[in-house]
Image (tube, grey):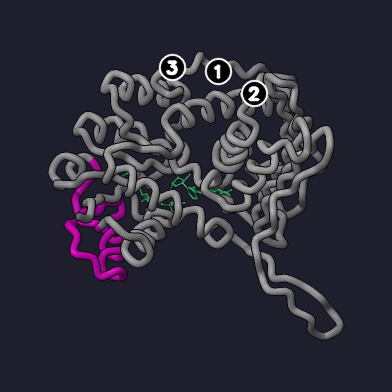
Amino acid sequence: MNIKIGIIGTGTIGADHARRITQILTGAEIIALTDVNLTQAKKVKTNLGLNATIFEDGHSLITKGNIDAVLVTSWGDTHEEYVLAAMRAGKYVFCEKPLATTTQSCQNIVDAEISLSKRLVQVGFMRSYDFGYKMLKDIIYKGDIGTPLMIHAAHRNQSVSENYTTPMVIHDTLIHELDIFRWLLNDEYVSTQVIFPRKSSYAHSKVTDPQIVLLETRQGVRIDVELFVNCRYGYDIQCAVVGEEGVANLPEPQTVTVRKKARLGNKLLVNWKERFINSYNVELQDFIKGVQAKKLMGPSSWNGLAAAVSVDACVRAQKSGQIEIIKLPERPIFYR
Ligand code: NAI
Ligand code: ISE
């Protein structure tokens, strides 16, 4: 039987998830939609030909929608209230990153989930579903490159809007690396520092771009991440893990190599939608299966909280220019 899903926030990723649930994935149907911009919700309903009710707001969708699960794909600062409301109503939740915009808000969600003694929340950290990252982790864990010592990484976006700010480089963009390196290394961060190279002339006034974030883990692994959100040439995610015996690189996305006009080349992808298209499919299919089995296995509220603690420290480091401590609370038994 199909599980019944409601979506709160039908903007860029909400509409894309609605498309994949309707046209690509199995086991679910969308029966309820809402957005503060109701025209946008109606547009998604019409474009996909959905037999779905449009609700005036997220809370009525949760309580009156007759749904099994809710996708929270509205803006980050609205996530906490919808996730908590959905949990109170006993609904499963797929919440896009960030789980919530403050550490305390993430802690509130973790506390609520523990008090219900049941995992109800999966966070939209999709990279652990990416085939390339899975292969990279496999290489590390088979010991093929020896003990990991360093990671050199880059997260480059072609461009961002004029509303994009310096802290967003951390809480909107770096947050994916903060999540995936913990997963790759099975380790936790202890400190961070942020360095600002010369500013790109293409960067808007509100964002200092590029930035370099340095992280240190409990086991002493040193990580440098270049964040460059107006890199112009494409969407580019790089990750090289340096071990005692070798180096393992995240594979490039597969594109056809073309020989033409005395050039040999591959097309570069230009946005996250294309780059991680398969990962989004796999993560949501996993969520659907988890709801059907009443057992969620994907990134948890704890991962959301761990990311938030690290985000806070990195934003502090942007302001202070100093090394800032990252102190994660002890992981509750519930999430081990
Ligand atoms: P967007 O601005 O394109 O869409 C958000 C939608 O939510 C808008 O239509 C807006 O009207 C609606 N909305 C805002 N507040 C609302 C409320 N209180 N109730 C109902 N609807 C509300 O933004 P986008 O890019 O789709 O991002 C949404 C979320 O998804 C963000 O948290 C973002 O960080 C995350 N995201 C995750 C990505 C990933 O790679 N996992 C990629 C892009 C976004
Ligand atoms: C966006 O919100 C995402 O989550 C993308 O995955 C990321 O690459 C981009 O920088 C963010 O703006």
Q: Is residue 74 visible?
A: yes
Residue 296 shown left or right of residue 259 in the figure: left
| Cα distance between the residues tagged 3 and 2 | 17 Å
Q: Which residue is mark 2?
A: 189
Residue at image position (57%, 41%) is: 176
Residue at image position (55%, 47%) is: 163
Mark before the other along the chain sequence, 1 or 2: 2
**Residue count near mark 1 (Cα–Cα under 10 Å), binned few <14, some 14–19, many ≥20:** some
**Residue count near mark 3 (Cα–Cα under 10 Å), binned few <14, some 14–19, many ≥20:** few
Write the start and end of the magenta stretch as one range.
29-58
Q: Quadrant of residue 211?
A: top right
Circle 1: residue type:
Leu
Q: Which residue is mark 3?
A: 332
Which is nearer the eye, 29 or 65? 29
Question: Badges 1 and 2: C-beta atoms under 8 Å apart?
Answer: yes
Q: Quadrant of residue 213?
A: top right
Residue at image position (31%, 70%) is: 47
Residue 327 shown left or right of residue 265 in the figure: left
**Residue count near mark 2 (Cα–Cα under 10 Å), binned few <14, some 14–19, many ≥20:** many
Q: Is disc 3 placed on a helix, strand or loop?
A: loop
